Image: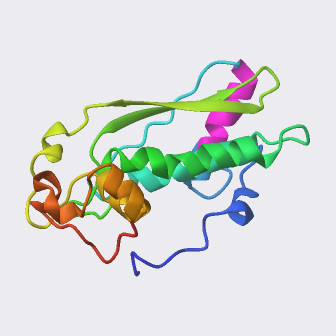
Amino acid sequence: LNPFELLPIYGVESMGAYPNKALGLAEPHAYAMAEEAFRTFLATSLSQSLVVSGESGAGKTETNKHLMHYLAWRSKSEHVGNDLAETIIAVNPILESFGNAKTSRNNNSSRFGKFTRIHFDSRNWLVGADVVTYLLEKSRTVTQSEEERNYHCFYQLFAGLGEEEKAALQLTKPEAFTYLSKGLVHVPAIND
C-alpha cells in the first residue's frame, strides 16, 4: 500500500453510505464516527465530541478535515447554501499555517493542540465554527533542527507578498532572517 496514493474512500460519493446508519452498520470510517455524533446530537440536542489522537504523522489533521467536511455536508438543507460550509472548510488551511510546520517526520505537522467547535442552530443547520488552540510549541519560533523549519505562515508571507509589499515591510527573503533560516527554507513538497 502506497501511503501517498489517494484512496477513493473520501469525498461526497463516499459520504452517501453513512447518513442515518447506526455505528457498526456501515464500514468503519471517520464518516461513521461523524454520523454517530451528528445523530446523537439530533436525538439529544446535547453537544458531542470527537477526539482524534495518535502519534506524529498518523493523520490527525487530515482526519479532522474529513470529519468537518462530513458534518458540513450532513447538515446541509435546501435552505442553507454551500457558502458557509465551504468557507469553514476553506479557512482551515489558513489557521493551520500558524501552527503547522515541517518536522523530520512530517511536512505538515501540527505543533499545537486544537479544539474545533462546529455550531448548529435549532434547525440543525451549520451556522459557524471556532477553533481554540493550546500548547503551541513556542520553541519552534526561535530554533529548528536542520531537517525542520519554522511555522508555515512565515514562509507563506514571503511567497504571497509582491515585491512592493515586501519592501514596505522591509522583508527580503526568508534566508535573511535568523529564525527562518536555521533549518530548511524551501521544501519541494510544500507549496508556500
For the stretch drawn in magenta, the main secondary structure is: helix
Q: Nearer the viewer, residue 56 or 144?
A: 144
Residue 117, visible in the rendered structure: no
Q: Is residue 148 above or below residue 139?
A: below
Q: Is residue 5 above or below residue 91?
A: below
Q: Is residue 79 above or below residue 182?
A: above
Tell me residue 100's x, y (percent).
Answer: 32, 50
Q: How many marks?
A: 0
Q: Is residue 113 magenta?
A: no
Q: Is residue 39 magenta?
A: yes
Residue 19 horizontal side relative to residue 148, left or right: right
Which residue is located at x 60 percent, y 21 percent? Answer: 47
Residue 42 horizontal side relative to residue 46, left or right: right
Residue 62 horizontal side relative to residue 176, left or right: right
Tell me residue 192's x, y (percent).
Answer: 38, 65
For residue 48, what is the image quadrant?
top right
Which residue is located at x 75 percent, y 23 percent? Answer: 121
Region rendered in magenta = 34-44
Q: How is the image coloured?
A: rainbow
Tell me residue 150's x, y (percent).
Answer: 21, 54
